[in-house]
Image (tube, rainbow, N blue to C red):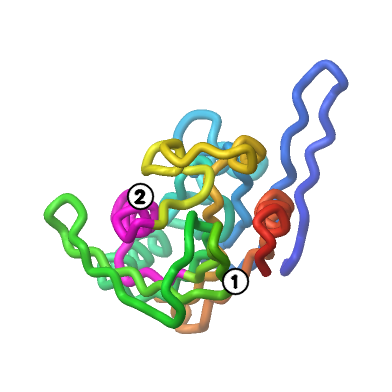
Amino acid sequence: RMNDVIEIVPHDSRPTKVSIVTLYEDDDYIVVNKPAATLSNGPRSLEERLQRQAASNWPCCVHRIDKDTTGCLLLARHEEALEKAMQVFKRHDINKVYRAIVMGTVAPGEQTIRTPIGDESAISHVRVLDSNREASHVSVRIETGRTHQIRKHLAGLGHPVIGDRQYGSRSKHSAKLTKVGRQMLHAYSLQLRNPVSGGMVRAKAPLPHDFRRTLRLYRLT
């Protein structure tokens, strides 16, 4: 059901596991709010945890989110749902919006980045939500889903994601940056037409605590 929360109560001798929050669920798909420091699929992943809880080989990830990126992750509950959703992604017939906190002052308004990634087309629409001399809070709607697309596009724009050690913010080390434990990138919302039933799949993941804390740290809204 909507807003169900799966709670994992650990033994004192084991590390605490972060709860998995369900954002959307129907007979074909489930959207969960992926925590940070969690793989989407593979060994010791969120997908594996959900399958273990269901005592099944399902659900399976339709797409992936970087380990240190949080937010909306779509999983299919059966084979037909997986195959049809993958076709939806290939056609780019899905609306995915991210939030990011980036270094520096991004020009106000909205701009589109079309820099190819790995010789493949990649399109990101960037809109400024708040900005100051030190950092900016932006919304990014992606038409394509290339590996590290948003992180690469924003770094190429001269505004790497704060906390992203791979694509640039390490070179702009500051006392504030040492307080940021991961890249400030969050899969904020996801919307597509259910290719099995024809209904709409809509989910929105609230900004996580560390993202909101970083907004305050850089005096952004």
> In the picture shown, does residue 126 fall above or below 57?
below
**Mark 2 to mark 1 CA distance (whole Å):** 22 Å
The answer to which quarter of the image holds residue 186 is bottom right
- In the displayed structure, does residue 59 sit left or right of residue 49? left
Q: Quadrant of the N terminus?
A: bottom right
Residue displayed at 54% across by 36% down: 45
> In the picture shown, does residue 20 fall above or below 85?
above
Circle on res. 203: 1
Q: Which residue is mark 2?
A: 148
Q: Please tell me whether mark 1 sits on a helix, a strand or a loop.
A: strand
Q: Earlier in the sequence, mark 2 or mark 1?
A: 2
Indicate the amino acid at tag 2: His
Indicate the amino acid at tag 1: Ala
> Which portion, as a residue range, is magenta?
140-158
x and y, in percent, of residue 165 in the image: 45, 37
x and y, in percent, of residue 52 in the image: 62, 37
